[in-house]
Image: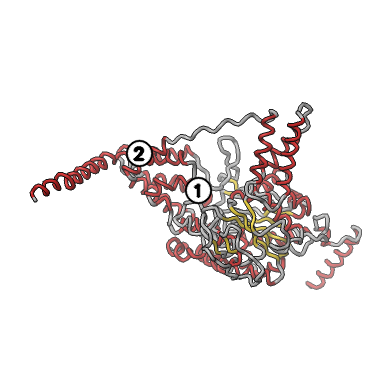
């Protein structure tokens, strides 16, 4: 009977195809202009943490709006100041008056955990129903202008879209605090969808930052995906997590050291004078009470939010997994979550092996990484490896060895050639910081010196390189062209490209310019265009071009003269340093005790060294 039904359906399908002019059923579903018959495979961007909109919903499934009537993004949390103040006000006042913990630590911890409630997970590691991911289940060509602005704002691949067509570009949005298994499942299904609607039998994927952890899962949970991939272009991927997350999950947190909290921690995260002001203000609490509040808050976030989030666990370095899981996932209620994190840990351990398997089976794999920017000093291991500010270099560069930030490889160091046996290849960076031969893919990994992780998309050379890799086969390795050397430099060309250069070109249309000013304006424009056209950057080239354009535009009245920078105030810096020197980490209420103690110590010192000493000498 089933065979008869199949025959009838087949006959019906044949006649329906004939009725529309002989177009095949497969072609009827293809949405690309090329119908899958072009040389450029469609590319799927797998973005990083926070690069997908996740909206907060109420119990009815409606968007919750903030005071300005805007939807609330769940990343990184929602800090409703009014609600937080209402929770902590009374215990804070009581604690200030008594200088004891009158419920302040618990209230603060609860308020902080409440600000992240939408990023918590259930005991299956899944996000609550109060969140909605803004997804784009179609090509950029079919996106609205708003959706395009969101996508290109995160990863400006407009040149790739212009060359390959927006119908060849896709953006895989996901909840950064979602379930790792579910996200990987969705990506695999998305790849099949993209193949189907583009007519291509292979795709490129572009895992960025946290997207690298998603790619780890994809290659390990779905090994058959190797047949679907043409190229993988990693961009600053967290293939072995981030040591920041490792330190947080193992509670090796820098600010829990009160000496560092009062002298060093905040200075690494913000302007020094602002940091010193906070250091002075928090002294309204005794230091032990402040540390209790911080410690309680960390424990609350670990237990209520972080410990159940499987996608956050994916950002944990594999070396920290045993310690963190033993501490946070030991209870029976964590059985399902630990089952999932164990599985991802295996994928993470297998990362290099799975990537090498891609290469061995003809998939081209490229990697673009940043280095020589210290990690944010949140964890105690913030300077234990070179980094890009957010992810340590050995994670993004697949195990590469390097000197620490601010240092160089030892004098006389010779590259180890761990993964490169070609004696003609020099993989030592010009600044002698990186030995690229020790990374898994020495011939297809590109490094950008002093480039910060969060500014990666602002580096126009990185975007041009990614476009060239995705849209053409011109670059096979780091030796293919001198236009894209293995070691390059940091840049932020957005201001020059989008603002100053267009302003200069408009000013050139003026008829009242002197010959001298016109000549300088033309020269400044030429310099800017030359810089923007280069792909082998020179440190400071963008800044110099921008400065020249600013100078001539200011001279001809297009820009207002910049006011000289005021000498920054050192008031709070001096006060904080003085307080730390004479009172350590003590709060204001403890100063009398500390002061009396210091006086007593001084008297004892004076008596023992001068008075009693003199009497002893007289007796002798």
Seen in the picture, residue 211 relative to 527 is either above or below; the reply is below
**Quick one: label 1, few (<14), some, or many (20+) residues within 10 Å?**
some
Q: Label 1, secondary structure: give it.
A: loop
**Residue 116 badge:** 1
Separation of marks 1 and 2 at Cα, in angstroms: 27 Å
Q: In this view, does 466 lie to the left or right of 438?
A: right
| Residue that numbered label 2 is attached to | 284
Which is more foreground, mark 1 or mark 2? 2
- What residue do we see at 47% from left, 52% from top? 378
Q: Is residue 365 left or right of residue 40?
A: left
For residue 127, say whether it is visible. Answer: no
Quadrant in the picture for residue 193: bottom right
Q: Label 2, secondary structure: give it.
A: helix
- What residue do we see at 43% from left, 47% from top? 264
Image x and y of residue 300, in percent: 43, 52
Query: Outermost residue, top direction?
Result: 512
Quadrant in the picture for residue 66: top right
């Amino acid at each position: 009977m089933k065979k008869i039904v199949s025959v009838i359906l087949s006959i019906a399908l044949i006649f329906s195809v004939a009725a529309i002019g002989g177009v095949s059923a497969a072609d009827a579903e293809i949405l690309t202009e090329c119908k899958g018959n072009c040389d450029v495979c469609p590319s799927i961007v797998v973005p990083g943490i926070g690069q997908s909109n996740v909206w907060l919903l109420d119990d009815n499934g409606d968007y919750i709006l903030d005071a300005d009537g805007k939807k609330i993004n769940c990343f990184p949390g929602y800090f409703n100041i009014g609600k937080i103040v209402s929770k902590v006000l009374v215990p804070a006042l009581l604690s200030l008056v008594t200088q004891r913990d009158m419920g302040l630590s618990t209230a603060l911890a609860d308020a902080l955990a409440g600000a992240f409630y939408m990023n918590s997970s259930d005991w299956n590691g899944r996000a609550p129903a109060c969140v909605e991911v803004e997804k784009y289940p179609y090509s950029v060509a079919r996106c609205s202008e708003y959706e395009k602005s969101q996508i290109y704002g995160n990863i400006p691949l407009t040149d790739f879209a212009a060359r390959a067509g927006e119908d060849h570009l896709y953006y895989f949005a996901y909840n950064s605090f979602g379930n790792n298994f579910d996200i990987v499942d969705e990506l695999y299904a998305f790849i099949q969808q993209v193949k189907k609607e583009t007519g291509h039998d292979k795709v490129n994927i572009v895992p960025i930052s946290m997207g690298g952890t998603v790619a780890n899962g994809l290659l390990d949970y779905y090994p058959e995906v190797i047949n679907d991939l043409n190229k993988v272009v990693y961009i600053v991927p967290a293939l072995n997590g981030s040591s920041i997350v490792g330190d947080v999950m193992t509670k090796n947190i820098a600010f829990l050291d009160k000496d560092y909290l009062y002298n060093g921690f905040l200075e690494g995260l913000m302007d020094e004078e602002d940091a010193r002001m906070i250091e002075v203000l928090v002294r309204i609490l005794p230091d032990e009470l402040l540390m209790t509040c911080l410690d309680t808050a960390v424990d609350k976030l670990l237990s209520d939010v972080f410990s159940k989030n499987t996608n956050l666990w994916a950002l944990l370095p594999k070396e920290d997994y045993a310690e963190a899981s033993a501490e946070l996932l030991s209870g029976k209620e964590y059985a399902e979550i630990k089952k999932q994190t164990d599985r991802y840990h295996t994928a993470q351990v297998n990362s290099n092996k799975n990537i090498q398997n891609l290469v061995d089976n003809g998939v081209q794999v490229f990697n673009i990484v940043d280095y020589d920017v210290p990690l944010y000093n949140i964890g105690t291991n913030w300077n234990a490896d070179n980094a890009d500010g957010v992810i340590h270099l050995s994670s993004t560069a697949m195990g590469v060895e390097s000197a620490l930030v601010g240092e160089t490889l030892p004098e006389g160091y010779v590259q180890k050639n761990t993964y490169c046996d070609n004696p003609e290849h020099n993989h030592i960076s010009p600044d002698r910081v990186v030995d690229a031969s020790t990374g898994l893919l020495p011939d297809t990994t590109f490094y950008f010196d002093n480039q910060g992780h969060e500014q990666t998309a602002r580096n126009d050379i990185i975007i041009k390189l990614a476009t060239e890799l995705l849209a053409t086969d011109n670059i096979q390795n780091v030796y293919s062209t001198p236009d894209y050397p293995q070691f390059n430099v940091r840049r932020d060309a957005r201001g020059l490209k989008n603002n100053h250069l267009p302003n200069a070109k408009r000013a050139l249309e003026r008829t009242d310019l002197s010959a001298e000013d016109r000549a300088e304006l033309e020269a400044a424009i030429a310099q800017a265009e030359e810089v923007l056209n280069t792909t082998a950057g020179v440190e400071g080239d963008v800044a110099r071009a921008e400065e020249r354009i600013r100078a001539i535009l200011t001279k001809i009245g297009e820009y207002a003269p910049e006011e000289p920078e005021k000498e920054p105030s050192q008031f709070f810096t001096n006060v904080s340093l003085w307080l730390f020197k004479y009172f350590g980490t003590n709060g204001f209420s403890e100063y009398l005790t500390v002061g009396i103690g210091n006086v007593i110590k001084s008297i004892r010192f004076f008596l023992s060294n001068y008075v009693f000493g003199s009497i002893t000498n007289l007796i002798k």
